[in-house]
Image (cartoon, grey):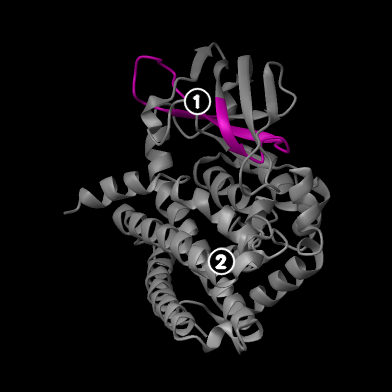
Amino acid sequence: MRPVLRDDHEMFRDQVRRFIDREIVPNHAQWEHDGVVPKSLWQRAGREGLLCVTAPEAFGGGGGDYGHSAVLIEELARANATAVGFTTHSEIVSNYVVAYGTDEQKTRWLPPMINGDMIAVIAMTEPGMGSDLRAVRTTIRRDGDEYVINGSKTFITNGINSGMAVVVGKTDAAARELTLVCVEDGTPGFAKGKKLEKIGLKGQDTSELFFDNVRVPVTNRLGEEDKGFRYLSHQLAWERLIIGIRAAASIEALLEETIDYTRDRKVFGQTVFDYQNTRFTLAQAKAEATMLRAFVDECLGEVLRGELSSEKAAMAKLLGSEMQNRLLDEFLQLHGGYGFMSEYKIARAWVDARVARIYGGTSEIMKEIIARSL
């Protein structure tokens, strides 16, 4: 029992684990082949209360806290099932709607998001933009009671399945301020590009989104005009900690799998585990994983108290993602040739982990953020 988590969090873990083992694990390989997760899975998850777990009960949500969110993130990482895409929908877009939406917007969008009928995405990244949010070129021009949106987005998680996109753009193309406007699927001028082919997270559909003179009512704006950068920055601490939480859980799960494998696999008449090099490698990994877990749980406690700083979140994201990539590479090496076979979880986890050093802000950007506090 970890001090940061309560009994209700662990009870929720049992429910989440049963769902993942029953609904996701047996089908995950097929979804990776297809490059997309069926919408029916989202609806089943919604019926079991596994989407938007922190959304208010008044709108059909679970009314949970970030501890419940962490449990869901950890269990998906344990099964190497991050590619199902629940986190972006539930822990990013849902939070924007709850934090900055009007009662009418919450009533309109949260119930279908919670029950899995509408999959929501954040349309932020653009071609050539990288981690620089202020480099956005998408325009959101006001025309009477409507906004006219023009631009394109790329690397959009759940883009093909999306039913609603929170679009990040500028009301003044020459300015640096950002505005958030929601665009629903089917709106004239809103188009989805082809599914992008990635080296990892293949089950997670990722696509481009295009906006060609898309008109939406002003009432689709989230929060105030030109306050979007502030909104995005406020939410980024949690979004980056998510990556640290995921890394810690992934390392722990793959460490146990590697220990079991090396105890069973024999080379030159003895198990791989019997070699000192193996035991030392695993001992080092255990020590580092334990330290990462302690730090991530400390950050989670600060999130629950509303105290997590952007610098500390950047540390969790930086250290977690870098450690995950390094240790999973070592675990794969201990599997030998079998570690390179996609049927083994370590192979899939190794390639899926690579993007953690990029999305949510690259490792280099995390170092810049941390350096500001020096």
In the picture, measured across the screen, residue 329 lies left or right of residue 361, that is right
Which quadrant of the figure contains the C terminus?
bottom left
Q: Quadrant of residue 64?
A: bottom right
Circle 2: residue type: Leu
Q: Would you call the spot at circle 2 few (<14 residues within 10 Å), some (14-19), or many (20 or more)?
A: many
Circle 1: residue type: Pro
Q: Quadrant of residue 154?
A: top right
**Residue at the limit of the structure toward the left, as seen here:** 374
In the picture, measured across the screen, residue 155 lies left or right of residue 279, that is right
Q: Between 150 and 115, which is closer to the camera in this rendering? A: 150
Q: Residue at x 34, y 19 (%)?
A: 175
Camera sees residue 8: no
Residue 256 in percent (x, y) is at: 58, 79
Residue 317 in percent (x, y) is at: 40, 56
Q: Which residues are magenta?
A: 153-181
Residue 155 in percent (x, y) is at: 57, 35
- Asked whether 180 falls inside the magenta stretch, the response is yes
Mark nearest the camera among 1 and 2 is 2
- Residue 332's tag is 2
In the picture, measured across the screen, residue 174 lies left or right of residue 356, that is left
Gap in Å between the C-alphas at discs 1 and 2?
33 Å
Q: Between 336 and 31, which is closer to the camera in this rendering? A: 336
